[in-house]
C-alpha cells in the first residue's frame, strides 16, 4: 500500500506580476512514508498538470520559474506525486494577476523592467498602436549606433539584451525605438553586467 503525499499548501510566489516576464513559485509536501516527491503545476487552471518538477526529499520545497503568457487573472495550483506514483489532491489556488502597463496611452511605449542586470534576463517592450499592422522595433546605443531590430504585429516585443548576432550587449544605456501604426516613440533601457 502506497499512501499519497499530503496535498501541498497554497503555492507561494509573486501575485501581482508583469505578463511575459519570469517569476519563481514554490511548493512543498510531506509524504507519509518519507518518499521523495515531485510537484505537478497547473498554471492555466484547466485541471491538468502542465509541468512536473524533479523529485525532492519529503517536506522539502521545490521552486519553478513560470512566465505568465497574457494579461489576465490566473489561479495556479499544484499537486504532489511520490516516487512510486502516489498522487495527492490539488492545493488551494494562488491568485495571480498579470498586467502590463494598462494605463499606457495610445501611441506610447514602455519597457519593463528598464534595467537588465544579468545575462539571460529579458524585458518586455510594450506599446499601444492605434491600428493593426506591423510595428518595427530598433535598439540603438546611446550614441545612435543600431545594435538590434525586430518587428511584431502584437503590442509586445520581448528583448533579451543581445545584439543582432546573439551576443550579450555591453553595459550601458540604450534606446528602444518603436515605429508602427499610430505609434512612434522611444524608451530608455539600461544594461549592467
Image: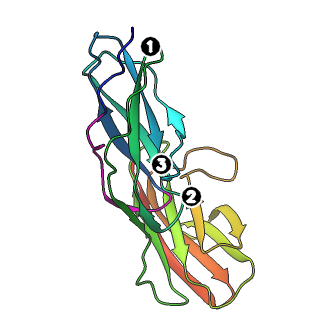
Q: Position of residue 69 (x, y in %)?
A: 54, 58
Where's the N terminus, which quadrant? top left
Q: Secondary structure at mark 3?
A: loop
Which mark identifies residue 43? 3
Q: Main secondary structure of the magenta part?
A: loop
The image shows residue 11, relative to residue 39, as above or below, that is below
Looking at the image, the residue that sits furthest to the front is 1
Q: Position of residue 10 (x, y in %)?
A: 27, 44
Which residue carries the number 2 mark? 159
Q: Image point 28% across, 10% down: which residue?
A: 34
Q: Position of residue 113 (x, y in %)?
A: 40, 62
User: Foreground residue, 62 or 160?
Assistant: 62
Label 1 near label 2: C-beta < 8 Å? no
Which mark identifies residue 83? 1
Circle 2: is it few (<14), some (14-19), or many (20+) Cα within 10 Å? Answer: some
Residue 38 seen in the current view: yes
Looking at the image, the residue that sits furthest to the right is 133
N-term mark: 3 or 2: 3
Spatial CA distance of label 1 from label 3 is: 22 Å
Q: Position of residue 137 (x, y in %)?
A: 65, 71
The image shows residue 29, relative to residue 25, as above or below, that is above
User: Foreground residue, 48 or 145?
Assistant: 48
- Quarter location, residue 28: top left
Q: Nearer the viewer, mark 3 or mark 2?
A: 3
Q: Image point 31% across, 57% down: which residue?
A: 15
User: Over which residues does the magenta segment extend?
Assistant: 8-20
User: Foreground residue, 84 or 16?
Assistant: 84
Where's the C terminus, which quadrant? top left
Amino acid at each position: 500500500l502506497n499512501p499519497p503525499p499530503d496535498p501541498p499548501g497554497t503555492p507561494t510566489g509573486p501575485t501581482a506580476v508583469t505578463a511575459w516576464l519570469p517569476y519563481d513559485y514554490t511548493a512543498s509536501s510531506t509524504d507519509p512514508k518519507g518518499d521523495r516527491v515531485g510537484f505537478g503545476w497547473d498554471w492555466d487552471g484547466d485541471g491538468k498538470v502542465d509541468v512536473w518538477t524533479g523529485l525532492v526529499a519529503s517536506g522539502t520545497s521545490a521552486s519553478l520559474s513560470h512566465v505568465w503568457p497574457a494579461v489576465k487573472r490566473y489561479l495556479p495550483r499544484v499537486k504532489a506525486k511520490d516516487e512510486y506514483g502516489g498522487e495527492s489532491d490539488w492545493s488551494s489556488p494562488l491568485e495571480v494577476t498579470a498586467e502590463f502597463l494598462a494605463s499606457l496611452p495610445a501611441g506610447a511605449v514602455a519597457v519593463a523592467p528598464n534595467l537588465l542586470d544579468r545575462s539571460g534576463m529579458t524585458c518586455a517592450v510594450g506599446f499601444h498602436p492605434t491600428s493593426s499592422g506591423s510595428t518595427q522595433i530598433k535598439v540603438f546605443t546611446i550614441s545612435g549606433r543600431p545594435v538590434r531590430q525586430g518587428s511584431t504585429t502584437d503590442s509586445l516585443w520581448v528583448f533579451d539584451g543581445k545584439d543582432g548576432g546573439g551576443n550579450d550587449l555591453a553595459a550601458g544605456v540604450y534606446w528602444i525605438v518603436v515605429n508602427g501604426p499610430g505609434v512612434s516613440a522611444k524608451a530608455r533601457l539600461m544594461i549592467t553586467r
